Image: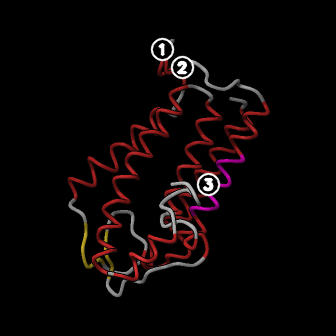
Amino acid sequence: MDPRFGSALNLVWLTLLAYWLWSARRVKPPMQSEHLFKRLVAYWLPLIAAMLLLGPGEWFGHSLLREQFVPHSIAFQSMGLFLCIAGAAIACWARHLLGANWSATVQLKDDHQLITRGPYRLIRHPIYSGLLLLFLGNAVLVGDWRGLLAVAIVFLSFWRKLRLEERWLSQLFGETYRQYVARTKALIPALL
């Protein structure tokens, strides 16, 4: 990867992380939380594995994971960086709209509110959509099959997490949430 794109990619991830930490300071206390062990196994370990897959290519030697799925060209790296920026922007916008209802884990908050504005009008989990777009852009920047494997791991982890969230939200909001599910998609407008 061109060093300029690597620096820009690092800036995108650092900006996202800084916003996440800054905005987490004023969340509501939880009313119900997923168990710690399940969070570790089903969410945090897959994210760590995905991040490691996106690490330095030398870690993977001459394995199939180092084979290119896109050329290491300025055009593809530009496209990858654009996807990263768009994904981070969507995730931060959605995170901002959730406000005090947000949590890093599956939780129901005291006085939990159903947010249906902004990107939530079209998809129920725009934070996951944005983060998946960020990982996909990162995979295009890396250009190797290991990047797509990282995206698949993150997708499966998020899919499991969103299914649990939807079950809890359906129990909490009842028919209102079921109607919301009927008119929106989970991750990709009009598709998925």
Residue displayed at 38% across by 60% down: 162
Magenta residue check for 17: no
* Residue drawn 49% across the image and 16% down it: 64
Q: What's the residue at 34%, 66% (across, down)? A: 165
Q: Amino acid at mark 1?
A: Ser
Marks 2 and 1 close (CB-CB < 8 Å)? yes
Question: Residue 187 at what x, y percent from top left?
Answer: 51, 57
The quadrant of the picture occupied by the N terminus is: top right
Of all residues shown, which one is farthest toward the right? 75
- The circle drawn on residue 160 is none
Q: Nearer the viewer, residue 159 or 66?
A: 159
Q: Residues within 10 Å of mark 3 (few under 14, many from 20)?
A: many
Quarter of the rendering containing residue 25: bottom left
Where's residue 11, x and y in %?
A: 65, 50
| Residue 160 in the image: above or below residue 61 | below
Q: How is the model colour-coded?
A: secondary structure
Tell whether 87 sits left or right of 176: right
Q: Secondary structure at mark 2?
A: helix
Please name the residue that numbered disc 3 is placed on.
87
185 over 178 or under it: above or below? above
Mark 3 vs 1, N-terminal side: 1
- The crowding category of the residue bearing disc 2, from other C-alpha atoms within 10 Å (few below 14, some 14 to 19, many at least 20), is some
Residue at the top extreme of this rendering: 62
Name the element at disc 1.
loop
Cα separation between marks 2 and 1: 6 Å
The residue to which callout 1 is attached is: 63
Going by the numbered disc 3, the residue's amino acid type is Gly
Tell me the magenta residue range: 82-91
- Magenta part, dominant SS: helix
Q: Which mark is residue 66?
A: 2
